[in-house]
Image (spheres, grey):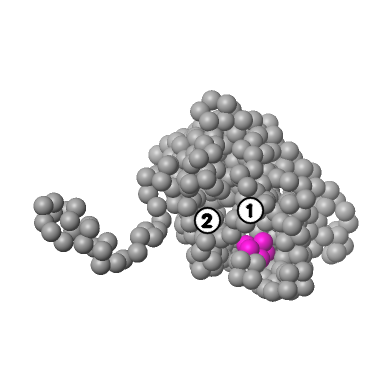
Amino acid sequence: MLMTPGLALFYGGMVRAKSVLNMMMMSVACLGVVGLVWVLGGFSLAFGDSTAGLIGNLDHAGLRDATAVVGGDTGIPLQVFAMFQLMFAVITAALLSGAVADRARFWPFALFIALWTVCVYVPLAHWIFAFDGYVADAGGWMANSLGALDFAGGTAVEINSGASALALAIVLGRRRGWPQQPMRPHNLPSVLLGAGLLWFGWFGFNAGSALAAGAVAGNAFVTTMTASAAAVLSWLALEHRLDGRPTSLGAASAAIAGLVGITPACGYVDTFGALLIGLLAGVVCQLAIRLKYRLGYDDSLDVVAIHGVGGLLGMLMLGLVATDAVNAAGADGLFYGGGFAQLGKQTVAVLAAMTFAFAVSFLLAWLVRATVGFRVDAEVEAEGIDEAEHAETAYDFMPLSTTARLHDGARLHEGTTP
């Protein structure tokens, strides 16, 4: 839960002052929209008894059974498990807002998120998170038939958000003036605070995915910290080499890149694997950000480069550095004598998640744009979305002067002489 307001601060600080409220409101909207969709039927479709490994049923719609328990001997109440999984759905939806910063209308974005949760997130969550016999007898094809490893959301959260963000950015088009005009973050302290809250919340995200306070959760905790720490250092070293200075924005972005990279792997790799994933994430994700200017797509806050590319990296690295020594439910990757088998399974999962998320998200975004309109007018984009969409501004820039106070008083008490 803490990660979503953390993301709002992270993203809000990265945009210009005239659109910070709209940016943060899109994260708040996801708590409301995804929360209701999940309770009413999203959770049941994601974790209910499967049809051909593709989608669940509606047996748990409404989450009304307060006595149901899942997970066999672990005995986790179904409602608790459902709320834990809800937070994955919320943060994934909120991540998409970073691709359309400065130019998306609020209510069409909320509509898109409702459709996207049902049509994109729920199926992907079913494929990779719904294990046979945990909530229902039959789960998703990716986890059970394919045997892909994904401890905490490399496919359903990270690759999904990256591919969906790319589709959104293409459908809405570039910000006016990008990349010629500088569009610098307006509040870097907010970015750092948001990154810190995300890092803190990620321990619950990753270690909590063990669904028990045991050795696997402890390993996930350690590998999460290790990877993110390594990513910060490798990112800043490369940034200093290429640009001459290590930046606070780079440090915040690096931390998230490392957390993304280790998300699918945290419960299946040891500290060596985590260190390698973190070092690579700090380099590869930064280079991916630089590449977007050559490719010409305007993913405003780099969801594609950090979450899409970082998630892809983590998923594929599992095929190399996974070891069943830390988790008997895992497998050995190539570097631990497991051959190429697991790498092949990871590749299939990555390609399936990318293709599905991009295609369906593109279609949904196009439908919203064609029916109710998705992008603000040119004048609104130039002047700032906050006033047009929310009738508010984040900051009052009026100088506090004696004249201003007197005039305010005169307006309140007409007929008096200042």
Give the x, y percent position of residue 95: 57, 50
* 109 relative to 154, above or below: above
Give the x, y percent position of residue 153: 64, 52
The verdict on residue 219 being magenta is no
- Report helix, strand or loop for mark 2: loop
Q: Earlier in the sequence, mark 2 or mark 1?
A: 2
Residue at the disc numbered 1: 181
The rendered magenta stretch, by its main secondary structure, is classed as helix
Image check: 181 left or right of 408?
Answer: right
* Residue nearest the viewer, comparing 369 with 357: 369
Q: Amino acid at mark 2?
A: Arg
Is there CB contact under 8 Å for labels 2 and 1? no
* 200 relative to 121, above or below: below
- Report helix, strand or loop for mark 1: loop
The residue positioned farthest toward the top in the image shown: 371
Residue at image x 51%, y 28%? 372
Near mark 1 (Cα within 10 A), the count class, few <14, some 14-19 or many ≥20, is few
Q: Quadrant of residue 409?
A: bottom left
Q: Amino acid at mark 1?
A: Gln
Image check: 60 left or right of 282?
Answer: left
Q: Quadrant of residue 93?
A: top right
Query: What are the residue bounds of the magenta stretch?
Result: 253-258
Residue at image x 22%, y 57%? 408
Residue at the disc numbered 2: 16
